[in-house]
Image (cartoon, grey):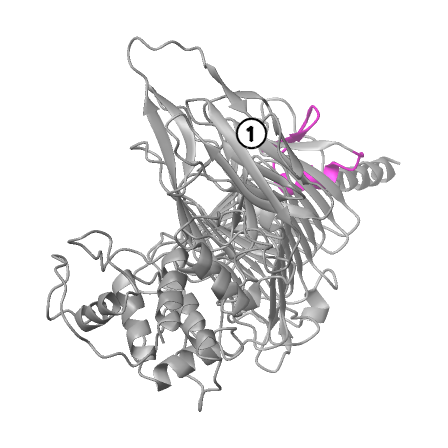
């Protein structure tokens, strides 16, 4: 009987020995689950079978643990450090296992010190909500060509992993990537998983067919590549702070989407570094598909480098991209499609990379990524600030003009618009200038109010005009009357408003009677000086009110095609008959149906075109060889004819400079050569040297009554030639033939 009882007791003892139990009070414990304490972390994990039960680390421990298939574990590092045993992954999560790691204290660490091993090796599901994950034995001295005897990934994910704010991942080594998502593809696209001397077949150890890594926040420092999204894998980054040690912050082989985060690449004088390095071998598991809609990428040689040897896809719709050499680069061997529809960049983006919907480039005056792109030219113009430059991407060279706006306040930078001729710009409002009143934007002959619409028809400069306010000045803005004739024959004239302050925009409406058209329209100030008008169409004209009363006058004439004339060419002007002759001969049609632009500077293109048409538009023998004269330009034949006839040789052997302003000296020289004039006599102009290239032409022009100069003693050869002057020269020269 005694022997039977003893046998039973022995059996019971052996049973209890085999079952993990909570430790008694006073014993050394490394972890607990609720109030139960355990001598190993693995034992605590095995005991945490109740849903949502948390394993809390109680002390620093050297141990490696495994989350087996079918187990869901919640681990609170509680400010303690978990370090692996030699030659082991610190935490392994098997396919079908789940692990959630937090750190209630904030100083918890999961470390690995073994070569070729990770702090977390995941084939299941892992969520990181806290803690620092590192490989502390890597000291940052290893090159990308040597592992230094101790190197690998801090985190290797072959399952599903989510990393959130509050997590830090570090790796001071420069041989291995820091976080690896997915498997490797060899040269022949065979899959491997662990690398180094410990290679296993991917299909045995893969975890998921497509590993998924989602990063919503956290801090990530180190590695050859901070994040390597490898074969088969999908990567999503929505936020976080990332910096690498050597190569790329993010290297993508398969599918990656980035919506936010700060990515700072290492600066290394001996090698190129990248914010994103996109590549792939072409297999279905190695797509090289990259989508970026946000994030800041700085410090790199290239913010984004596309190096795939197959038809990868890179879509960028937002973010900031700064590279010391280029923001975006594609290798010569890549067949990738790069489509950029948004974002800002440190250098201009190649037009081949820009989405076809983008029409305007905005260059900020300052900032690390000053270049941005807009679908609407109006949106780019509205976004522009002082010092910025807006460029129409779709404007052809022959139609592109430049408007420069000078604020003239001693502080604000110029703003530049490179736009297609005919573009309308809303003029900006200058900031308040202490002690001054803004009068308007002045183009040399007319003022325009801030907010007014300005049509850019030729390269021009608008200067901000300021008036000094004396110490005794009042802040009150006086108004001045706008008077109109009490009676106008053959039409009517109305104004709005009838009184205005300096700088205000006043609108004039003219209505000719049936059978009549507007002949002249003038606005003069108290001194009798004429103000510049803007034709708004449909019988409406605007002007900027000066600091005095003004008088509006209009005349109407019979609607006859011969007499139907420009309002800015009044009867009695010295150039009236010349303009009439030029229009009748088909030499020019004016700037619009109602504007000739007599005081606009004449370009080299316009002058040779006028000369060519005056000569009967002869067909040139050959096309010109100037690179800035497109074959289909309206002036191409005129330029070729001018060169053939020795009228001009261009600015250089390859450049004609069609949009450059022509001087008075150049204009009479072109005319002299076109008419094959012979110099005779001399002039008394003090600004015309006898050996100047234009001296003979000026002597000829004076002798043939083409011009008398700008005064009795000056010709002003270097002054811009106006449209009124050149048609007058032509008219007088051809009338004298």
Instruction: Indicate the position of residue 387 as horizontal and vertical percent values.
Output: 39, 42
Q: Position of residue 252 (x, y in %)?
A: 58, 62
* Quadrant, the C terminus: bottom left
Residue appearing at x 36%, y 66% in the figure: 732
Q: Which residues are magenta?
A: 28-51
- Mark 1 residue crowding within 10 angstroms, few (<14) / some (14–19) / many (20+): many
According to the image, label 1 marks what residue? Answer: 506
Magenta-span inclusion, residue 559 = no
Does residue 284 appear to the left or right of 408 in the view shown? right
**x 74%, y 36%: residue:** 48
Question: Can residue 421 be seen here?
Answer: yes
Q: Position of residue 278 (x, y in %)?
A: 55, 65
Q: Does dot 1 land on a helix, a strand or a loop?
A: strand
Q: Residue at x 30, y 80 (%)?
A: 653
Q: Report the side of 69 relative to 242 (left or right).
A: right
Judged from this view, the residue extending furthest toward the bottom is 621
């Amino acid at each position: 009987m005694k022997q039977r009882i003893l046998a039973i007791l022995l059996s019971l003892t052996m049973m209890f020995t085999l079952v993990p139990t909570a430790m008694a009070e006073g014993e050394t414990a490394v972890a607990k689950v609720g109030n139960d304490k355990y001598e190993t972390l693995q034992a605590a994990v095995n005991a945490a079978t109740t849903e949502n039960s948390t394993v809390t680390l109680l002390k620093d421990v050297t141990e490696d643990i495994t989350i087996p298939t079918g187990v869901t574990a919640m681990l609170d590092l509680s400010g303690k450090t978990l370090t692996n045993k030699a030659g082991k992954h610190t935490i392994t999560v098997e396919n079908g296992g789940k692990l959630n790691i937090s750190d209630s204290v904030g100083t918890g660490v999961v470390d690995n010190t073994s070569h070729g091993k990770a702090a977390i090796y995941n084939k299941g599901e892992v969520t990181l909500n806290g803690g620092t994950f590192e490989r502390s034995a890597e000291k940052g001295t290893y090159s990308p060509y040597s592992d230094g005897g101790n190197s690998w990934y801090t985190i290797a994910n072959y399952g599903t992993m989510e990393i959130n704010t509050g997590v830090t991942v570090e790796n001071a080594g420069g041989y291995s990537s820091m976080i690896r998502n997915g498997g490797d593809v060899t040269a022949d696209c065979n899959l491997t998983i662990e690398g180094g001397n410990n290679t296993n077949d991917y299909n045995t150890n893969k975890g998921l067919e497509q590993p998924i890594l989602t990063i919503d926040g956290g801090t990530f420092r180190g590695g050859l590549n901070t994040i390597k999204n490898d074969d088969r894998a999908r990567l999503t980054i929505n936020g976080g702070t990332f910096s690498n040690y050597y190569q790329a912050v993010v290297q993508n082989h398969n599918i990656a989407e980035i919506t936010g985060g700060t990515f700072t690449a290492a600066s290394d004088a001996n090698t190129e570094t990248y914010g994103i390095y996109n590549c792939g071998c072409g297999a279905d598991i190695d797509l090289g598909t990259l989508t970026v809609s946000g994030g800041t990428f700085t410090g790199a040689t290239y913010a984004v480098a596309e190096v795939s040897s197959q038809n990868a896809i890179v879509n960028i719709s937002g973010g900031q991209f700064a590279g010391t050499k280029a923001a975006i680069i594609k290798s010569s061997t890549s067949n990738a499609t790069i489509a950029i529809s948004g974002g800002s960049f440190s250098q201009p983006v190649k037009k081949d990379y820009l989405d076809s919907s983008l029409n305007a480039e905005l260059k900020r005056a300052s900032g690390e990524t000053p270049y941005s792109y807009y679908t609407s030219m109006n949106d780019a113009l509205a976004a522009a600030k002082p010092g910025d430059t807006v460029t129409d991407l779709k404007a052809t060279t022959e139609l592109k003009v430049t408007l420069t706006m000078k604020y003239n306040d001693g502080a604000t930078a110029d703003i530049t618009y490179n736009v297609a001729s005919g573009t309308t710009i809303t003029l900006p409002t200058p900031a308040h200038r202490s002690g001054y009143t803004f009068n308007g934007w002045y183009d040399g002959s007319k003022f325009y109010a801030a907010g007014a619409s300005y049509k850019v028809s030729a390269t021009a400069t608008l200067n901000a005009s300021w008036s000094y306010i004396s110490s005794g000045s009042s802040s009150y803005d006086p108004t001045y009357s706008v008077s109109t004739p009490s009676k106008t024959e053959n039409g009517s004239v109305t104004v709005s408003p009838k009184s205005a302050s300096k700088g205000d925009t006043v609108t004039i409406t003219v209505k000719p009677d049936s059978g009549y058209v507007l002949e002249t329209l003038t606005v003069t100030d108290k001194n009798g000086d004429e103000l510049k008008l803007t034709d708004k169409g449909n019988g409406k004209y605007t002007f900027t009110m000066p600091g005095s009363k003004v008088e509006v006058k209009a005349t109407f004439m019979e609607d006859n095609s011969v007499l139907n004339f420009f309002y800015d060419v009044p009867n009695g002007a010295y150039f009236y008959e010349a303009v009439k002759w030029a229009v009748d001969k088909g030499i020019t049609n004016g700037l619009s149906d109602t504007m000739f632009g007599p005081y606009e500077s004449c370009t080299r293109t316009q002058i040779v075109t006028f000369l060519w048409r005056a000569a009967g538009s002869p067909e040139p023998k050959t096309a010109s060889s100037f690179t800035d004269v497109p074959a289909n330009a309206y002036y191409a034949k005129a330029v070729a004819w001018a060169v053939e006839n020795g009228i001009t040789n261009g600015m250089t052997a390859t450049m004609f400079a069609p949009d450059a302003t022509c001087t008075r000296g150049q204009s009479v020289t072109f005319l002299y050569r076109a008419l094959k004039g012979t110099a005779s006599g001399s002039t008394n102009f003090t600004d015309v040297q006898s050996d100047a290239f234009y001296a003979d032409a000026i002597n000829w022009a004076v002798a043939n009554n083409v011009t008398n100069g700008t005064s009795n003693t000056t010709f002003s050869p270097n002054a811009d030639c106006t449209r009124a002057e050149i048609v007058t020269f032509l008219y007088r020269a051809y009338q004298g033939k």
